[in-house]
Image (cartoon, rainbow, N blue to C red):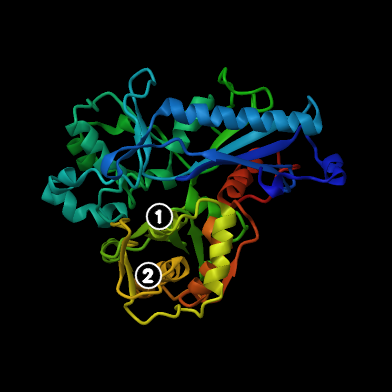
């Protein structure tokens, strides 16, 4: 249990235990739930590993039943703890679900999953990418706001189609949307998550007809579109534990964007940096950039898509530094938080940049179309601290490319807020301060789950809800 889950007796007596709300974050590494009271004070946090099934060559999938089983275990555990603390009257009145983009579930006509969810970082789809009609490939970035690559959902859907899955008559739900539906809510396509699929035309706000035709589906493949935070019914599925039964449901949206609203305002001049498996720099826009600008940004893998706040857009610049850092820890035998903290201390004992010469340790793989850790050691003395420091420098180099590209399209940012699991490492903070202006660190341990809880609170009557995100 996270330390933030502990409440002293004074705090317990002040909580309205029948008016709790919760944010659920379907992350690439863990599924987290954060419960707050109606005033936004954290009550508890709990998480379980995301139930991926790893295959050869980096292929990674998740069965819908495994996701439901994980969430059920999570809700059962949290429900029991809330009852232990507050008694049988404890109730979570609203639940919002956020999570990763690009991954989702294909359902048949009666709502049964017909294929597992493919991870956004799964490498499959190169053949389908190469076979896209030229007219679609040429317009893709400008229309969708996304760089064309195997990460986008439509390429994985084409892979499933070519592997024999009949898509006609099916429909698609992104993972957070699917979970809301499985909990008992309405099916809906939330704009920020739909922006990750490659199927949404950013100018019209509707599916791209020519791409639907190429996929072999019609507009019914996507459910009706909705904004993040829109009410989508109640948690009334039989497997929902009593503490959560009847909770109002909503989709909070794409995880990195939900993290950005967890602190309240998200100034247009600030980088919001969400540091998970992917490290993502966000910039808020009050209107979308034009077609040509979206094309230019896509050349360096920067997205211009819809935000979770209606009527706004975001630049999303991502690199796979978290994935490389995780694999580096595994490589040097660090498997727990205590080991990571010791390594952090060792890195901080080095000068910024390490003690080895330029080029003695080189790293590649963080670019958003990559994700394969490539490490070259040309000198002795490259222990775990030096290697991890080199990975951090490589991350800085990739971020600098993205920052320069964004600065050519919008006014440069003047501040940055680091959030997410990696942001707690002092070595990460030191490294990013060298490339990000005015970098500060969020005090929250789970910004995305808290941001989702903010959306949940907004479902309740104004007298007890927090400020609207």
For mark 1, what is the residue?
327
Q: Earlier in the sequence, mark 1 or mark 2?
A: 1
- Residue 455 in the image: state x and y as whole percent: 60, 44
For mark 2, what is the residue?
394
Task: Report the front residue among 388 and 266.
Answer: 388
* Location of residue 117 by image quarter: top left
Say whether residue 436 is left or right of residue 35.
left
**Does any portion of residue 21 appear in the rendered image?**
yes
Is 376 above or below relative to 138? Answer: below
- Residue 69 in the image: state x and y as whole percent: 51, 26
Q: Residue at x 48, y 54 (%)?
A: 276
**Does any portion of residue 309 appear in the rendered image?**
no
Secondary structure state at the residue bearing disc 1: helix
Graded by Cα atoms within 10 Å as few (under 14), some (14 to 19) or many (20 or more), the crowding at tag 1 reads: some
- Residue 28 in the image: state x and y as whole percent: 45, 45
Is 437 above or below relative to 310? Answer: below
The answer to whether mark 1 and mark 2 are in CB contact below 8 A is no
Task: Report the front residue among 444 and 222.
Answer: 444
The CA span between labels 1 and 2 is 14 Å
Is 29 above or below relative to 379? Answer: above
Q: Which mark is residue 254?
A: none
Q: Residue at x 47, y 45 (%)?
A: 29
Q: Residue at x 58, y 61 (%)?
A: 341
């Amino acid at each position: 249990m996270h330390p933030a889950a502990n409440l002293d007796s004074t705090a317990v007596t002040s909580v309205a235990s029948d008016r709790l709300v919760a944010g659920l974050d379907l992350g690439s590494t863990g599924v987290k739930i954060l419960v707050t009271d109606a005033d936004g004070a954290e009550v508890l946090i709990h998480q379980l590993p995301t139930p991926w099934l790893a295959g050869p060559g980096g292929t990674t999938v998740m069965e819908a039943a495994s996701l439901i089983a994980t969430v059920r275990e999570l809700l059962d555990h949290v429900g029991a703890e809330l009852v232990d603390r507050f008694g049988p009257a404890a109730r979570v009145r609203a639940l919002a679900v956020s999570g990763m983009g690009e991954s989702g579930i294909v359902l048949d006509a009666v709502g049964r999953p017909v294929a597992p969810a493919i991870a956004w970082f799964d490498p499959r789809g190169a053949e389908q990418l190469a076979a896209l009609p030229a007219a679609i490939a040429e317009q893709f970035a400008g229309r969708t706001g996304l760089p064309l690559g195997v990460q986008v959902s439509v390429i994985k859907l084409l892979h499933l189609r070519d592997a024999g899955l009949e898509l006609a008559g099916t429909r698609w739900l992104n993972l957070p949307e699917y979970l809301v539906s499985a909990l008992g809510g309405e099916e809906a396509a939330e704009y920020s998550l739909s922006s990750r699929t490659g199927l949404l035309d950013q100018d019209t706000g509707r599916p791209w007809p020519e791409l639907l035709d190429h996929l072999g589906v019609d507009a019914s493949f996507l459910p009706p579109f909705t904004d993040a935070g829109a009410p989508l019914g109640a948690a009334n599925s039989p497997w929902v534990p009593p503490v959560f039964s009847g909770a109002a449901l909503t989709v909070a949206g794409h995880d990195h964007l939900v993290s950005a609203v967890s602190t309240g305002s998200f100034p247009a001049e600030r980088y919001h940096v969400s540091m998970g498996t992917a490290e993502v720099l966000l910039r808020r826009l009050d209107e979308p950039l034009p077609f040509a600008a979206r094309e230019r940004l896509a050349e360096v893998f920067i997205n211009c898509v819809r935000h979770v706040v209606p009527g706004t857009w975001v630049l999303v610049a991502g690199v796979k530094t978290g994935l490389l850092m995780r694999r580096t820890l595994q490589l040097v035998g660090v498997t727990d938080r205590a080991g990571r903290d010791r390594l952090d201390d060792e890195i901080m004992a080095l000068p910024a940049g390490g003690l080895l010469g330029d080029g003695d340790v080189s790293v590649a793989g963080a670019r958003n179309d990559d994700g394969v850790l490539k490490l070259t050691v040309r000198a002795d003395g490259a222990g775990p601290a030096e290697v991890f420091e080199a990975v951090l420098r490589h991350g800085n180099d990739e971020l600098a490319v993205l920052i320069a590209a964004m600065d050519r399209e919008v006014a440069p940012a003047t501040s940055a807020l680091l959030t997410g699991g990696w942001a707690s490492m002092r070595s990460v903070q030191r490294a990013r301060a060298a490339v990000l202006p005015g970098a500060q660190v969020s005090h929250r341990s789970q910004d995305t789950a808290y941001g989702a809880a903010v959306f949940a609170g907004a479902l309740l009557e104004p007298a007890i809800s927090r400020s609207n995100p």
